Image (spheres, coloured by chain):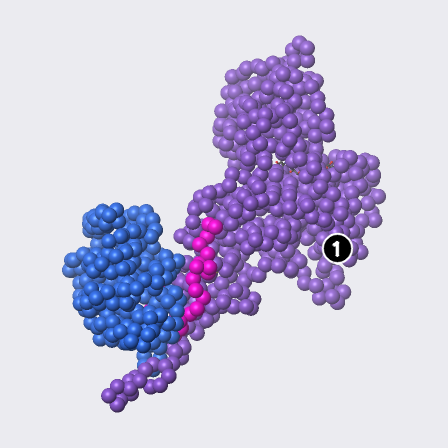
Chain colours: A purple, B blue
Amino acid sequence: MSELRLEGKDLPVSRTTTLGNRTGSWKYIRPVYHDRVAPCNQKCPVGIDIEAYLNLLREDRLEEAVDLLLRENPIPAITGRVCDHPCETACNRRELDGAVAIHAVERMLGDQALTRRVAASPVTQREQIGVVGSGPAGLACAYHRNRLGYAVTVFEAADEPGGMLRLGIPEFRLPRAVLDRQLEQLRELGIKFVCGTRIGKDLDWSLLASFDVVFIGTGAHLARPLGLAGEDHPAVRQGLEFLQEVNAGGRPDVGRKVIVIGGGNTAMDCARTARRLGAEVTVAYRRTREEMPAIREEIADAEREGITLEFLVAPVGFGDDSEGVVDIVFERMVLGEPDASGRRAPVPTGARFEHAVDLVLLATGESASLEALPPSVQVYRGSIAADRLGATAEGRYFSGGDVAGHDRTGAHALGAGKRAAIGIDRPLRAQRASAASPEAVPAELAALSLGPQGNLSMTRWRHDDPVRRVAPVDEVVSPELLNLTHFEPAERHADHKPNGAAATTFAEVNLGLTRNEALAEAKRCFNCGVCNGCELCLIYCADVAIRRATGAYRFEIDLEYCKGCGVCAEECPRGAISMTREGL
Amino acid sequence: MSQIMIKDALQQRELMTSGHLACPGCGGALAMRMVLKELGERTIVTMPACCWSVIAGPYPTASVQVPVYHTAFETGAAVASGIRAALDMRGDTDTTVMVWAGDGGTFDIGLQALSGAAERNENILYVCYDNEAYMNTGIQRSSATPWGAWTTTTPVAQPQANPKKDIMAIMAAHRIPYAATATPAYPTDLVAKVRRAKSVRGTRFLHILAPCPPGWKYADERSMELARLAVRARIFPMLEVEDGQHWRFTMDHPGDPVEPYVRAQGRFRHLDDAQIALVQERVDARWTELLGRVMN
Ligand SMILES: Cc1cc2nc3c(=O)[nH]c(=O)nc-3n(C[C@H](O)[C@H](O)[C@H](O)COP(=O)(O)OP(=O)(O)OC[C@H]3O[C@@H](n4cnc5c(N)ncnc54)[C@H](O)[C@@H]3O)c2cc1C
Ligand code: SF4
Ligand code: SF4
Ligand code: SF4
């Protein structure tokens, strides 16, 4: 461009940029990008990177989302149906308009995974792994060992694998087709199942000597009698045994009136199963609705199906009536001080009354299956004594799940099985590392956990996270770190959709979300703590100091010019930027 | 989609460079960046004295990559009218001529030139980035300074005693084809208004609220939050006015209390509860008045 002249004189024109002016020197604090931990991730007992798969779904990368889920959870179609979803309880979206229906999204992804053809995992290691018990704990251990390259054999006492998923949970909550297909895929992976073999009875523990490591996940199946007079009456049955009979295809006569004692999932399942067999059912629980350990949706379904809940009542004895009818004597309770479980304890009032019923189902909890353990495995307070990685005092034996005293849910059992898989791998990997192959053995378990209280991540153990991670910090994203301004309200899809039919068949009750609904639901996720490339930071930088980058991370901050105003960190919707004085 | 995905809404081009001299967290600097993104390269700016006279860079540097004419305080709109005429003579009707003025150069010193240009319906875009005082000369009050605010010329003993001038009503009274309010805190709304303005012929007026950390006295990182609080509390409603007659809101104004906005700023620190209640009353009264216009 030619110079501007006026009346023979040059006009002053600025032609260079201001880039020579390093305004970065003004700052005393600077922004840094880093991943924090989403609260849902920390709360999932399985240890699933929920945030990451929801983000993949947001980007319409469905198959990759399924892959990511399968890295941590061997049976998502099952947890997507029966898990009590503590992840949702922790979800930050509650602060705006209701938790993301993570559970329902997981179910959709799980069903998607069921349609896949599965190739056998290559066996690359020579150690043989034995697993005793095919409930979620054993399945998770077997699955992860298999994916790490080990030959795995699972021994199961029952005729078919699945543990409580098959023996306890009824079909109307977990269709057998889903369970069977999920197990078929585990077989396709190359896991060997030996069923109808109770170790310690049908086969001695010593015969497992050829296995380098044995995982014990035998669950909690032992009936715990109430110790009340008349309990041996033929019309008083163990609820779990009743469920097993019906789940195996039996249709016992339950009569007209049934009372179920208990307030957990077993009680709800017993009640709903008896209802389907034609009875009028009452659930009697000694505390109140708030203290019920059963999954909320199941309680709601039970009530919808016409089951009566009676609170603050406890059985004190059973009397014989005519013609197989049993008289159950109750005592009225009140709530007292909190007990060891933190729930308010029922206190007897002395007031008693009676009911005459055709069947009483006891669903007050089972004890760990410790009846046939190898002698070297130690028991502590009714459970196998094992550390966080499942190791028992005897190095060859690992354990997890109900039998090892973990919280009694499928998700916790899956989490424990995974931890044990890592625990088994640790010494083996260390051995291999010393044999000149430089395989890293993360010493610090903290580096593997999804937040300070989260479960361990198999992905981190394997060092092959497909998601880009930026300077991850082990801090869970609290709602205060988010900037909710940048989210528009979007109503939660009700993830529990009862089919509306009368409780007469064993068809699945909860219809779940359609694929499109689930995909829309996934887009409600804030992606707490992890940059999803929304570019708000970039657009809000008055100093044009944030730029797109192609390297390890999506953005780079040009510290030569960043003045340290902190607007980017303040505005980032998900707490993926912090201000620090470090390095200045 | 529950999250606003800004990256799909804004142009990627960048016509402002780093190294400019705005204070950290400056709302006015960010406003320029967003406006230029939407206007593009074919833009000529006239700039009467204001913070931006400094931000644009000392000679021989420039922080924006379009031609800028620094003008005398009162002449922003007049110089723009001249440039427009020259471009028209050359047959260039595409280039946008934009006045970029602060509140002093708009509400006070440049008002007659602006009024003249608007009355002639000059084909220019006039943007006032309003930080509510003469900030770069050391925070002196202007007629855009809100009631009750401290400035160096309205000290705590005698804070600003007059209400903020209603510049939108003044511009509407000129019956110009398009006038709107905006703030960089709502980037999609802002660029949509720039796009609208760019597509209209005649005088277009944008009134942009530009929070100023040193002048308003708040922590730098809260700039966008303050602008949002002002909008949500109906202190600075988001509007469009067509032909001076058709007023409409471009977003919801939930009517949050003014108090958090006021309390967040050191320039209002001296206000007691009763005075804040008075601010609320004034805001409510203006809102009622505005509703009357929007309904018409
Ligand atoms: C009725 C009912 C409903 C439930 N509903 C839910 C729910 O909705 N959501 C949820 O998260 N959790 C639910 N639970 C709890 C959940 O099922 C258990 O916490 C979980 O299955 C425990 O897994 P596990 O692998 O430790 O043991 P299990 O699932 O009990 O599996 C142990 C397996 O080991 C086998 N076994 C035992 N001893 C031997 C031996 N010596 N040799 C070979 N095999 C042996 C058993 O036959 C069994 O198959 C429910 C439980 C019940 C009883
Ligand atoms: S397994 Fe349970 S806790 Fe984990 S993500 Fe799925 S629903 Fe949530
Ligand atoms: S919003 Fe998303 S990332 Fe955040 S807690 Fe909920 S599901 Fe997890
Ligand atoms: S504002 Fe958006 S792009 Fe920037 S760090 Fe946060 S999530 Fe990533």
Q: In which quarter of the image is ligand 1?
A: top right
Q: Residue at x 51, y 49 (%)?
A: A523
How many numbered marks appear?
A: 1
Residue A311 horizontal/vertical position (percent): 52, 24
| Left or right of residue A217: residue B215 | left
Q: Classify residue A539 as left or right of residue B28.
A: right
- Residue furthest to the top in view is A322
- Answer yes or no: is residue A528 visible: yes
Chain that bears disc 1: A
Which amino acid type is shown beneath numbered disc 1? Gly
Residue at the location (52% across, 68% down)? A549
Asked if the stretch drawn in magenta spans residue B6, the answer is yes
In percent of width and height, residue A584 lies at 44, 71
Residue A250 location, x and y as percent? 72, 25
Whether residue B194 is visible: no
Q: Which of A419 and A86 is in front in this view?
A: A86
Give the image quarter of residue B6: bottom left
Splitting the image into 4 quarters, where does residue B188 fall?
A: bottom left
Q: Is the magenta stretch mostly helix, strand or loop?
A: loop
Magenta span of residues: B1-25
A520 w.r.t. B129: above or below: above
Q: Which of A388 and B32 is in front in this view?
A: B32
Residue marked by disc 1: A149
